[in-house]
Image (tube, coloured by chain):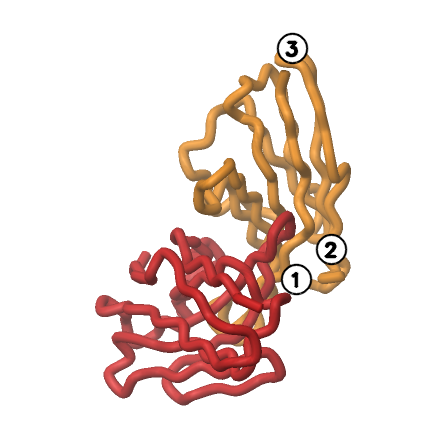
Amino acid sequence: DAKTTQPNSMESNEEEPVHLPCNHSTISGTDYIHWYRQLPSQGPEYVIHGLTSNVNNRMASLAIAEDRKSSTLILHRATLRDAAVYYCILRDGETGANNLFFGTGTRLTVIP
Amino acid sequence: ETGVTQTPRHLVMGMTNKKSLKCEQHLGHNAMYWYKQSAKKPLELMFVYSLEERVENNSVPSRFSPECPNSSHLFLHLHTLQPEDSALYLCASSPSQGGFGNTEAFFGQGTRLTVV
């Protein structure tokens, strides 16, 4: 399974944008880039995913580099409820179900 | 509420006990997963079932025994556990339309297990 690299932790002020980076230099052409987050004492929660083009949804935006070797999750206005561990994961679109591996993620602290 | 329900939410068991964790989803998903999350550690993928067949077993000790009787239910049977098995056990499910890579996974709230 292709690996991703994320900073261990980041801080953001409340109501400011947050850019969470992820490097995936060994990404293959069929890998989708997924982001999940885990709030304290809860299971992980899907945030967004994409293949090549930038993606937007109600939670966040995903900016994918042209060479696909890195991506950035963008929270447009951080709130205290966004404090969580954010995971960047690659899922192969062609293989079966057994490719949902989590790394250590980035712990986001939101400062009031 | 994600549509994936785990019971019980909390469980305390002795090392000689036998217990089972239950996971249920009625989302029509084809794949179901068991994860273990120990304190301060990443999620560890334990087992994966696709269309009720086990497709992944990540070197999990035999004291953990999964069972997938149908596409909506997943169990994790526990016996003769050790204190180091105390952790949050998470269940997830995902669909396969268009390939698993292009679908999102839904997680339950987890079972907090304490082995004494």
Q: Which mark is residue B29?
A: 1
Task: Give the mark toward the camera: 1 or 3.
Answer: 3
Count of marks, rendered view: 3
In this view, B8 is above or below A56: above
Q: B11 or B6, which is in the foreground?
A: B11
**Callout 2 crowding tier (Cα within 10 Å): few <14, some 14–19, many ≥20:** many
Q: Which residue is mark 2?
A: B25
Asked if disc 2 and disc 1 are in contact, CB closer than 8 Å, the reply is yes
Q: Which residue is mark 3?
A: B16
State whether residue B51 appears in this view: no
Distance (Cα) linking label 1 and label 3? 34 Å
**Is residue A47 toward the left or the right of residue A94 in the image?**
right
- Quarter of the figure with the C terminus of chain B: top right
State whether residue A106 appears in this view: yes
Q: Chain of mark 2?
A: B
Q: Residue at x 34, y 74 (%)?
A: A30
Residue B42: horizontal and vertical position, in percent? 44, 46
Residue type, mark 3 in image: Thr
Asked if disc 1 and disc 3 are in contact, CB closer than 8 Å, the reply is no
Colour of the chain lettered A: red
Residue B92: horizontal and vertical position, in percent? 61, 53
- Quarter of the figure with the N terminus of chain B: bottom right
Determine if marks 3 and 2 fall on one subunit: yes
Q: Chain of mark 3?
A: B
Residue type, mark 1 in image: His
**Is residue A53 toward the left or the right of residue B80 in the image?**
left
Identify by letter the chain in orange.
B
Asked if disc 3 and disc 2 are in contact, CB closer than 8 Å, the reply is no
Q: B87 or B25, which is in the foreground?
A: B87
Q: Residue at x 26, y 75 (%)?
A: A69
Residue B52: horizontal and vertical position, in percent? 62, 48
